[in-house]
Amino acid sequence: MSAMAELTAGRLLTSWQLDVPALLLVVVLGGLYGWGVLRVRAKGEPWSPARTAAFTVLGLGALVVATMSALAVYDHVLFWPAAVQNILLDLVAPLGLALGDPLRLAVQALPERAAARLRRTMTGRVLRLLTFPLVSTGLVLATELTVYFTPYFGTALRVGWLHELMYLHLLAAGCLFVVPVLTREETLPAWCTHPVRAGLVFLDGVIDAIPGVVVMTHGTLIAGAWYLHHHPSWSPDVRQDQQIGGGAMLSIAELVALPFLLMILFQWARAERVQTAALDRHLDQQQAAAAVAVSTPSTASTASALSTPSTPSAQPAASAERVRPWWETEKNEVAARIRRQHGEHGEQ
């Protein structure tokens, strides 16, 4: 490995190697997503091309770059390519996959029974615990610290299957936080509204900076025995290499945090517009129905009112029915979200 050619800007772009397990994962994920898009469109339902592009280009693309580009070619002789690999896997790739909204696509594409089972799984206790915002943020931080400050990383450099498992571990840990926050409200507590999620994403951005800072300033070399033995003559000093890697981790983490926060703010604004439009529409419908009832009472109802005295109990019931909130009677996404929020507040 020490005889490897010097890593130049040209080789950084042109050096590639095949990683069969990673390629299989990319093919499976891409194939399932493509099948889902075709199924949804066959039903006559739209699916945003932007979501598909985010899933394939940013999500699967980051996975390919992390595992098969020059980063993978040189990760056994330089620390900084390995550090960039890992941050791509637990931050960038999960963000791209989440922007593709694969879970919603699966629910829409699967047959009703399979979709119902998937919903039950996504709202089950285990996943709700793992995707609870503070838990999933802690898992991402714990994963990164475990990789760098235990024998995990040094062993993975020597053992091929463990290296592949580390890739999958980083990707899964990142997805547990990013995917629910961006796409699946059902797996989050009712109090985790868009403002709360924006705060959590900001906090996550601060926490994601910790591993980079620690790696950059840590006095002990990470996997030092391996890199001291394998570093090529043209490479920087091993300690400087580690500092470059920590700086790259910190920079990428902060760069990813900004678009992540902007996406949450965009979703928040869109949800507010949808909810306001729904409220206005239902209020207009109720006012129109009330105006018609007052101006054109039916003859049968008038005669019935004259012949049958109203009982005290009937009037409050009718009045209560007239003032029931629209979200208790309507069946749509906005009404379901408001019912969940009111139900959660009622339990508290």
Image (tube, grey):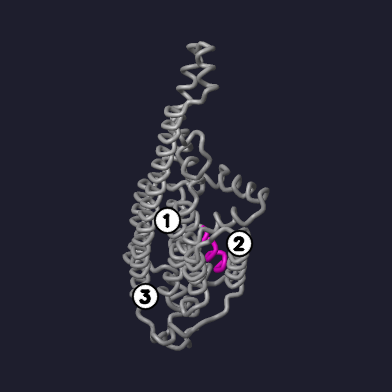
- Mark 1–mark 2 distance (CA, rounded to whole Å): 32 Å
Q: Secondary structure at mark 1?
A: helix
Q: Which residue is mark 1?
A: 141
Instruction: Looking at the image, tell me whether mark 1 or mark 2 is earlier in sequence order.
Output: 2
Magenta range is: 162-172
Identify residue for label 2. 36
Element on which disc 3 rests: helix
Which label sits on residue 253?
Answer: none
Q: Earlier in the sequence, mark 3 or mark 2?
A: 2
Query: What residue lies at 35% left-to-right and 58% top-to-bottom?
Result: 262
Disc 3 marks a residue whose amino acid type is Asp
Of labels 1 and 2, the one closer to you:
2
Q: Is residue 260 visible?
A: yes
Q: Secondary structure at mark 2?
A: helix
- Magenta stretch, main secondary structure, is helix
> Which residue carries the number 3 mark?
241
Looking at marks 1 and 3 on the same chain, the residue that comes earlier in the sequence is marked by 1
Q: Residues within 10 Å of mark 2 (few under 14, many from 20)?
A: many
Structural crowding at the residue carrying mark 3, measured as other residues with C-alpha within 10 Å and reported as few (<14), some (14–19) or many (≥20): many
Location of residue 142 with respect to 65 vertically, above or below = above
